[in-house]
Image (cartoon, helix red, strand yellow):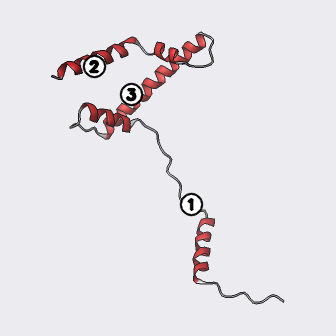
Amino acid sequence: MLPAPAAPSKGAKKASKAKSSRASGDKKCKKKRKESYSIYIYKVLKQVHPNTGISSKAMSIMNSFVNDLFERIASEASRLAHYNKRSTISSYEVQTAVPPFYFLANSLSLRLLLRKQP
C-alpha cells in the first residue's frame, strides 16, 4: 500500500495558487510596440532648436509625414527597379527616386546655417 500523502508545505500552496490563476486564462497581454520616428524627430529638433518642445499632435503629424515620405520614395524606387528589370532596389534607384529639390533644399539650409555663425 502507498503511504498517506503528507500535508503540503506553505510554499507549495502558493505555487499551486499561482498555477491555478494562469490556468484559468487570466494572462496579461503584452502591449504591442508601435514603431515611430518620434525619438529621432525629437533629437533633430533639439539639435536645431534646443529650447523648443513639440506637442504630441505635432509629433504625430511629423511621424505621418516621415512615413509618407519613405513610402513615396520606396514606391518610386520599386517602380524604377521594375522598369530596369531588376529584382533588388539599390542606392541608385533610391537616389533617382528622391526629387532633386530635396538635395537642393538640404544644401541651401546648410549654407544658411554656416553663414549665420560668426
The answer to whether residue 83 is seen in the rendering is yes
- Furthest toward the right, the residue is 1
Residue drawn 35% across the image and 32% down it:
61
Q: Is residue 26 above or below residue 42?
A: below
Mark 3 or mark 2: name the one nearer the start of the chain: 3
Mark 3 or mark 1: name the one nearer the start of the chain: 1
Residue drawn 58% across the image and 71% down it:
18
Mark 1 or mark 2: name the one nearer the start of the chain: 1
The tag on residue 27 is 1
Measured as percent of width and height from the top left, residue 115 is found at 19, 18
Q: Which class describes the residues within 10 Å of circle 2: few (<14), some (14-19), or many (20+)?
A: few
Q: Which class describes the residues within 10 Å of circle 3: few (<14), some (14-19), or many (20+)?
A: few
Residue drawn 43% across the image and 26% down it:
68
- Furthest toward the front, the residue is 118
Mark 3 falls on what kind of element?
helix
Residue type at mark 1 is Lys
**How many angstroms separate mark 3 from mark 1 (CA)?**
37 Å
Residue placed under numbered mark 3 in the picture: 65
